[in-house]
Image: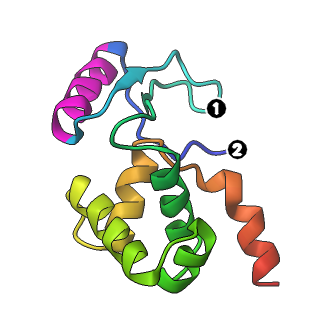
Amino acid sequence: MTCTRTAYESKNEARAARRTIAKRYQMGARETDVCANCFKYHVEVILGHPVNEQWKKILELLAQGYEQDEIAKQIGVTPRSAEWRIATIRDHFYAMNRPHLIFITTALGLIQPNNFIEICEEQHA
């Protein structure tokens, strides 16, 4: 399995990145030990305020290519509410658009494409 998160050569680089993430995105994060896949360090974002399980679900659905109406059905809200939540998440991460949002959150380790890539392949087969 390939690492999809941003990798750092040293523990000090990962520590500096953790501080930047915590300050910029106002969320908790921690450095990892050396990754068994890439032999580098990563920073893991800690779910909590403001990133909760619903935000993570929305991000995963966006990454899988779901549209706003489909996301609304999946999370049990109106399409307008889903649009507002997506915009709030995008603004929180200073993303220019949805692909940029997916890139940022994948790099932060909030979503793991390797966890749902099989779902996408099954849906499009």
Residue 121 is situated, as x and y percent measured from the top left of the image, at 76, 74
- Name the magenta segment's main secondary structure: helix
Quarter-wise, where is residue 82 in the image? Answer: bottom left
> Which image quadrant for residue 125?
bottom right
Residue 14 belongs to the span the image colors magenta? yes
Q: Secondary structure at mark 2?
A: loop
Tell me, for residue 102, which label it has, or none. none
Q: Which residues are magenta?
A: 12-24
Q: What residue do we see at 50% from left, 62% from top? A: 58
Give the mark, 1 or 2, whose residue is nearer the N terminus.
2
* Badge count: 2
Q: Amino acid at mark 2?
A: Met
Residue 33 x/y as whole percent: 52, 15
Within-10-Å neighbours for mark 1: few <14, some 14–19, many 20+: few
Q: Nearer the viewer, residue 14 or 112?
A: 112
* Residue occupying image coordinates x 26% and y 29%: 17
* Residues at marks 1 and 2, CA–CA distance in whole angstroms: 7 Å
Residue highlighted by disc 2: 1
Amino acid, disc 1: Asn
- Contact (Cβ within 8 Å) of mark 1 with mark 2: yes
Is 103 magenta? The answer is: no
Q: Is residue 56 left or right of residue 81?
A: right
Judging by the rendered image, the residue that carries numbered circle 1 is 37
Q: How did the renderer colour the structure?
A: rainbow
Q: Is residue 32 above or below residue 47?
A: above
Q: Position of residue 38 (x, y in %)?
A: 57, 32
Label 1: element kind: loop
Q: Residue 56, how many percent across, how many down? A: 50, 52
The answer to which of 35 and 89 lies nearer the viewer is: 89
Q: Residue at x 33, y 27 (%)?
A: 28
At 45% from the left and 54% from the top, the residue drawn is 55
